[in-house]
Amino acid sequence: MSANPFLDPALVHGDLYRTDGRLAERTRALHQAKIAGRDAAQVIVDLLAQRISPGAVVLDIGCGRGTTTLRIAAGLRPRRLIAVDASAALLNTVRTRLAEVNEVGSTVCADFHHLPLPDAMADAAVAAFCLYHSATPAAVVAEIARCLRPGGVAVLVTKSLDSYAELDLLVQAANLDPGTARRPSLYESFHSDNLLDLAATHLTVLDVRHERHVFEFADATHLARYLATTPKYRIHPAGGPAGLAAILRERLPVPPYLTQSTVSYALAVRP
């Protein structure tokens, strides 16, 4: 097993995304905790809206559960919208969510290192919160560039290396996973500090933006819901999240529990 679960192919193609449940719970817990920071999907749509015209072909690479896919569909009305992910379960969720709001898009199940798409077929591409799953993210940027027409725009989004570092300290303080702060960041391969350099390997970068997000977990139950679904931590308490919450209440200071993350956006074009 890799020291970084996000770079372990067995986990990425197995327990992490075999179903959409783990990602959905982690995302819900984090969104409920956010007290500062713009909605990332809306920032992406706003960046694309400045660069593409109606009737564009748009790719959402590493689309996950489709939150950004839905926002692109509703906000940009592209002629063709293609959501790509390596998880069939997540793509099933994307299709269901699109149908529930009467939005149209197609899905492709594929490894983003080898996109089964023609050269120069898209006007825009998004790769949000996914390239840190690659040990060679520049190779994924090359694939994205290949699929863009000349002048086509890409929005690449990631997080800072120190994202949620305060939670590492809480996990250690509770003696749940003493080694967690010594392990690599989940975002070590593609993060705020190397975003510009990696994007520039195959694209012309127009702008890079960094935004600080702040999260407040109201109580031990809320924090446990997030920690139990985060692959960085090697926590296996009896009783699942409820058992974890009981341990946190016993061992940690009085809540709330605060943490931060930097979300970074690169806007780039294919030369």
Image (spheres, rainbow, N blue to C red):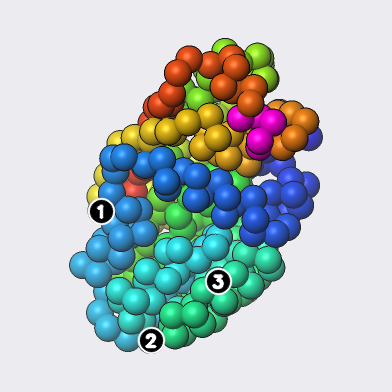
Q: Which of the image's four quarters has the N terminus?
A: top right
* Residue drawn at x 28%, y 40% as measured from the top left: 36
**Identity of the amino acid at label 1?**
Leu
Residue 18 x, y percent position in the rendering: 73, 57
Residue contact between numbered discs 1 and 2, judged by CB atoms under 8 Å: no
Task: Classify 230 as above or below 148.
Answer: above
**Identity of the amino acid at label 2?**
Arg
- Of tags 3 and 1, which is closer to the observer? 3
- Spatial CA distance of label 2 from label 3 is 18 Å
Circle on res. 79 = 2
**Identity of the amino acid at label 3?**
Val
- Spatial CA distance of label 3 from label 1 is 30 Å
Residue 234 x, y percent position in the rendering: 71, 28
- Spatial CA distance of label 1 from label 2 is 25 Å
* Residue drawn at x 57%, y 50% as measured from the top left: 25
Give SS at disc 3. Answer: helix
The residues colored magenta run: 241-245
Tell me which corner region of the image, top left, top right, bottom left or bottom right, holds residue 84: bottom right
> Which of 101/205 is in front?
101
Q: Mark 3 — residue?
A: 94
Task: Classify 17 as above or below 48.
Answer: above
Give left or right: position of 108 versus 223: right
* Residue drawn at x 63%, y 41% as measured from the top left: 229
Give SS at disc 2. Answer: loop
Which of the two labelled residues, at mark 1 and mark 2, occupies the earlier sequence position?
Answer: 2
Q: Which of the image's four quarters has the C terminus?
A: bottom left
* Residue drawn at x 36%, y 81% as measured from the top left: 78
Q: Mark 1 — residue?
A: 206
